[in-house]
Structure formats: C-alpha cells, structure tokens
Image (cartoon, grey):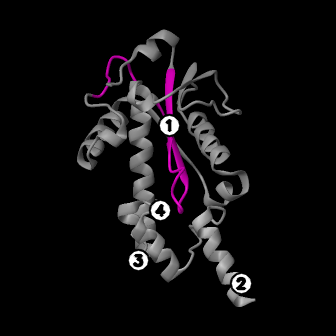
Amino acid sequence: MVPDFKFEARVGGRVAGVDEVGRGPLAGPVTAAAVVLDPQAIPPGLDDSKKLSVRRRETVLDAILASADVSVAHASVREIEELNILRASHLAMERAVAGLRRSPDHALVDGTMVPRDLAVPATPVVRGDARSLSIAAASIVAKICRDRIMVDLAQQHPGYGWETNMGYPSKSHRLALENLGVTPHHRRTFKPVHNILYQEKIISD
C-alpha cells in the first residue's frame, strides 16, 4: 500500500493530514502533527513513517518543512495522567490543527475517531499514514519531533535507554524502571509504572 492524494482530492479545498505518535510509551509526551501539503510541490518519498529509515525520514522532513504548512503540538505527561491517553492524544491533535498558519477547510485524521473539539470538519482514515500523503507527512513530522524530545530527555535521565526505545516499554526500559525508579517523565497511570509506585508505597508503609 502506497499513500496517494485521493482522499485530499475527494474532500477538496485546503486539507490537513493529522497524526500522532506516543500513545504506547511509558514516558514522555504524546505528540501530534498537522500538515497541509502544497499539491504542486508534494515531497518525493512520502510514506508511513514506520516504513522509512531514520535517515530517509530526516530527508523527507526537510522537504516537508520547505513546502508545506506544518504544526506540531503535544499533550504533557500530566495531561495524559489527568485525561487518559486517548483524550490526551486528541488534545494534541486539536492543538496541532489550531497551530497551522491558515486554518484548513478539512482534516484527515489517522485512525477511527475524530477529536471531539477539532475546530474544522474532519474525516477519520483507518491506516491513514499508509493511505494519505498528508497523513503520511504528519506521521513523519510527529515521529521525528517526539524522538528528538526523548533523546534530549535521555541525556537528562540516563539509564532508561530513551534514546533508542523512545519511552516504549522495551525489556531494557522495564528493567531500568525497576532498578532506577520512576522519573517525573513517566506516566504514573500506566500499569508498569503504577505497579512500581504501588510497590514502593507498600514498602515505605
């Protein structure tokens, strides 16, 4: 499956692709991107970010930033804990769309649901990052931006391997969590983190 511009052409007008990354990690924010491509200057090589190498993603990102209207937004760990991860990811999407230089006429949102407070009409697209060029572009932007945040946090909190696992619950991350404890960037409502905090509470009590 290769993404194309059929969804955008069908909707018409100024269309934003919207995607998020970071629902599954135990640490760090959830990040969303909204991208409005110029139909006359679509960057070559656009595809689902998961299919591209790190080097290829970076190259395509430069082309996206040079030709498209791009906005990136986040929902913090605290917001994830207070709202739940689904609502927090939708909040990040809403912020990303609101941050575009010009409001789009329509948004194509990766997944099965449209954020309830999105300010523009929207259509959910299942596997959108593999089917829509605009959503594919958003997936690349969101992925790279969040990865960079986690690499930075890894330098502040060494030992968890965030520069490679990006906060996802890899075996090494789980072991580090048990051995080093919980940081302010861990999502306390996520079960592996909650369990460690609960164990610590029992021991201290």
Residue drawn at the location 46% of the way across and 35% of the way down:
70
How far, Cα to Cα, is label 3 from label 1?
30 Å
Judging from the image, what secondary structure is the residue with disc 2 in?
A: helix
User: Given this view, does label 1 or label 4 mark the residue nearer the observer?
Assistant: 4
**Kind of residue sitting beneath label 3:** Gly
Q: Quadrant of residue 93?
A: top right
Residue drawn at the location 42% of the way across and 27% of the way down:
134
Tell me, for residue 159, which label it has, or none.
3
Which residue in the protein does label 4 denote? 169
Any part of residue 55 in sight: yes
Range shown magenta = 15-43
Which residue in the protein does label 1 denote? 19
Coordinates of residue 125 in the picture (x, y in percent) = 51, 25
How far, Cα to Cα, is label 1 from label 2?
40 Å
Coordinates of residue 13 in the picture (x, y in percent) = 51, 13
How far, Cα to Cα, is label 2 from label 3?
25 Å
Name the N-terminal-most of marks 4 and 2.
4
User: Given this view, does label 1 or label 2 mark the residue nearer the observer?
Assistant: 2
**Farthest-out residue, bottom:** 204
User: Given this view, does label 3 or label 4 mark the residue nearer the observer?
Assistant: 4
Residue drawn at the location 40% of the way across and 71% of the way down:
172
Residue drawn at the location 28% of the way across and 49% of the way down:
54
